[in-house]
Image (cartoon, rainbow, N blue to C red):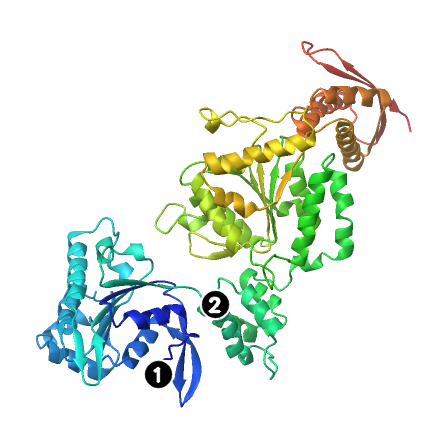
Amino acid sequence: MIIIDNDTPRWIRELARFIHIKSLLLVHGNILDLVSYPLTRNGQQCWIDGDDLSGFLRRFLTGLGYEIVGLYDPLDGLSFAETDMEERFRQIHPTTDQANIPALCPRPGEPADPHAALVALSHALRNTHHPSAFVFNLASRLLASPDHLSRSELALFTRLLKASLECKEVIRDDGRWHNTLILVCDKINDLPTFLYVDNPRTRSITLDRPERRERTRFCQTMYSAFHAAPSTAPSSELLTRFSALTEGLSYYELNKLVGLSRQEHIPLEPVEPLIERYKYGITHNEWNTLDHQHLSKAEAYISSRIKGQTTAAARVLDSIKRARLGLAAGSGARSQRPRAVLFFAGPTGVGKTELAKALATLLFGSEERLLRFDMSEYSAEHAAERLLGAPPGYRGYESGGQLTNQVKEHPFSVLLFDEIEKAHPRIFDKFLQLLDDGRMTSGQGETVYFSECILIFTSNLGTVAMSEQADGPRLELVSPEMPYSQVRETILKAIREHFNLILGRPEILNRFGDNFVVFDFIRPPVDEEILDLLLSNLVNTLATERDIDLTISANARQMLVDLARNHLDHGGRGIRNLLDTALVNPLARWLFDHGVEQQSVLILEQLTDHGVEASYRFELTIVEVSE
């Protein structure tokens, strides 16, 4: 006998309540999962964790005393929970003789006829002697589109609605039952709306994935089945970690965790290696290699690559240390949300992308672990399909999504969503799920986990005029003449107004919390530091790749500094472009013209600017030193 109490999953309690008062129940949601429920066996309570939904409904309805329990699906037709139930069904509807059996229970390879089944079971639903309940499994597969019903589909569901309206009650001395029809579907909107809108006889019941309490109970019940499990009960700490790390997993997946543990000899405690093996296919978590000594050098490493952004770097380092420890407010265990979520804002060319690259190298050893997505490429309405993958039946379905494919291949990564304000508003719905749950379902139906990633969003809001604001209030834009405090406040104001007023999506803004990192303009003397860094990289590249020793005189360096100071509108990117024009191009010309390709000692003594109208604006005076 199935037990109905406060420990029973919520949807089962709801089903037990409304089956006595509704004639049409629509069960939808996590219907392909296994079902977990308590029952009494030999006078003791136990839990069943490996039954499918059909098996549960068969046991549940039979246990309630229904004398006819029929199960129909589009392929196998109509079957009954017990043999004697079919006899009772035939007694109620005598015309269901041998000639009609193929239509109700087709032979292998022959399609079932739902119209014939409905005609037959309608008689059972109207009877007042034998309590009857019928389950239509895979009801979503009975039609192509609920908004465009064919003539046959419209007739089928109209007949189904009529059957539910004609359901009778069975009242006897031993009890009272409501004849019931149960439709099991993927989503409620897979069915025609006339079945449930303004229909007081219908009840929709959502079958959710297991809640935290249910995952904890599963761990307690199945603890001894894991590999090398001790004879003692699991500790409360283990139960807390297991329930937190398995958030979003189905009962089917929880059962497969047990199988994986036994197959690959991975014990449940500590729980992280087993969960990571299941989610990511690995047993080594790259975050665990980031020890205190490694992170103690992070500030120096970031300062060597990003100049003039000490405030931004400090905010980012705080987030990285928190991510390494896995701390989350309001949670007893590490959250399954991404390790860190950052929003980089500020003028162009000030180091936002460079800092993201530095983080990828610092944390995961290579800039290739930075997965960059230019959101201006996702401004079209159907751009989400490119990001996550097209749904089944659409072009490109087999190739999957650009984001989900890369994260599946590299679960430990830094994800950079560049110029997020240019993305189509529909994509923000996907980001909501990503920021809240740390996972996404691809177009192929596969769950991809982001809980080991760092998410970085960048924006130029407040620094450039946006076309969407042309007809609205003119927003104040930042300028290099402003102090950093005013730059920060102006940019944050522009971000708030964009998400709240222009997009009308304040919930997106709330997901970022206080993780906004505002970058300052490149100002003197930071421009000299950036120039020196670029010059050092150039000199090192020549020495390493061509064995050319280049020395730049103080006079030539100062001229480069003066030129760079006039190109700060585009930040460090403007300095790099100036250096390419004023030094790298004329240097390459000199090396080529003088036949110098390797193993030379050179001194750059003078840089001459002939003006923008000259054929060659910049000319270098270089002395080759004989060794």
Q: Kindly check if marks 1 and 2 are in contact, taking CB atoms under 8 A apart as contact.
A: no
Image quarter of the N terminus = bottom left
Question: Left or right of 196: which side holds 615?
Answer: right
Binning the other alpha carbons within 10 Å of mark 2 as few (below 14), some (14 to 19) or many (20 upward) gives: some
Up/down of 152 relative to 82, above or below:
above
Question: Left or right of 99: which side holds 486?
Answer: right
The percent position of residue 502, horizontal first and vertical second, equals 46, 34
Question: Left or right of 192: which side holds 35?
Answer: right
Closer-to-camera residue (506/218): 506
Q: Residue at x 40, y 69 (%)?
A: 10
Q: Earlier in the sequence, mark 1 or mark 2?
A: 1
Res 572 → quadrant: top right
Read off the residue under disc 1: 1
Read off the residue under disc 2: 253
Question: Left or right of 242: which side holds 127?
Answer: left
Q: Amino acid at mark 2?
A: Glu
The percent position of residue 506, horizontal first and vertical second, equals 49, 42
Closer-to-camera residue (505/182): 505
Res 334 → quadrant: bottom right
Q: Residue furthest bottom?
A: 42
* Secondary structure category for the residue under label 1: loop
User: Disc 1 to disc 2, how far (Cα)?
Assistant: 26 Å
Q: Residue at x 51, y 63 (%)?
A: 247
Res 326 → quadrant: bottom right
Query: Mark 1 or mark 2, which is nearer to you?
Result: 1
Up/down of 197 relative to 372, above or below:
below
Image quarter of the C terminus = top right
The percent position of residue 556, horizontal first and vertical second, equals 82, 20
Binning the other alpha carbons within 10 Å of mark 1 as few (below 14), some (14 to 19) or many (20 upward) gives: some
Up/down of 551 relative to 248, above or below:
above
Closer-to-camera residue (506/252): 506
Q: Residue at x 52, y 70 (%)?
A: 257
